[in-house]
Amino acid sequence: MGLDVVWEPLSRYPHLPSHIRSWLQDSGSLTDRIESACSVFNLTLIGEGEAQLHACERQSLHINATDNHTVREVLLCGDERPWVFARSVIPPELMSSEFNQLGEEPLGRRLFNDARFRRGEFEVCRIRHTAFTPEIELPLWGRRSVFYFQQHALLVAELFLPASPLYQTGS
Ligand SMILES: C=C(O[C@@H]1C=C(C(=O)O)C=C[C@H]1O)C(=O)O
């Protein structure tokens, strides 16, 4: 599953409810925030390997179709429920160095423990995807940002799934 959607700057939504804005613009590690919001945290690795990129991903990273990048897709689960689907586009040079042997270790553990990574601005998307059986009123919210490291850039996109606390007003 990809996130080939329309991305807009977060500033496009100046009047978001505070519980939604709080999650979308949280500049810390999402893994850490999810871990602190549940009793049992689990990361499920859906896939990791070279894959076709969406046009919106290539545009974000300023790469062309022939550039090889690794796509990593995971589910971040809180208390046995899927809270976030994440899709990251990672240059091979980083997969063989800073992100070597990542497996089911959260990407954020490496990113946020290395001051050499710099995070760019957030963009957000809204998905009215009928495939989801919404326990919440649609749309689903997603966010993405680029992390810069030396001459490399990697894209991290996160879709907040219906069970995510982002949709709960008290979160
Ligand atoms: C960037 C982070 O890493 C999280 C873990 C990911 C992974 O392991 O692939 C991808 C995106 C994030 O949800 C974070 O914790 O903020």
Image: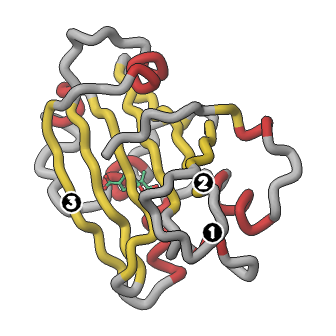
- What residue sits right under mark 2 in the picture? 141
* Disc 3 residue type (three-letter): Leu
Question: Is ligand 1 closer than 8 angstroms to the Cβ of mark 1?
Answer: no
In the image, 85: left or right of 13? Answer: left
Q: Amino acid at mark 2?
A: Trp
Asked if residue 62 is positioned above or below residue 49 in the image, the reply reads above
Image coords of residue 66 (percent x, y): 21, 10
Q: Which residue in the structure is indicated by mark 3?
A: 45
**Which of the marked residues, 2 or 3, is nearer the chain's N terminus?**
3
Question: Label 3 CB, ligand 1: below 8 Å?
Answer: yes
Q: Which residue is mark 1?
A: 166
Q: Are marks 1 and 2 in contact (CB under 8 Å)?
A: yes
Quadrant of the image where one finds ligand 1:
bottom left
Looking at the rendered structure, the secondary structure element under dot 1 is helix
* Callouts 2 and 3 close, C-beta under 8 Å: no
The residue at 58%/51% (across/down) is 128
Q: Does residue 116 appear anywhere in the picture?
A: no
Q: CA distance from mark 1 to mark 3?
A: 22 Å
Q: Where residue 150 sits in the image (x, y, percent)?
A: 38, 22
Q: Nearer the viewer, mark 2 or mark 3?
A: 2
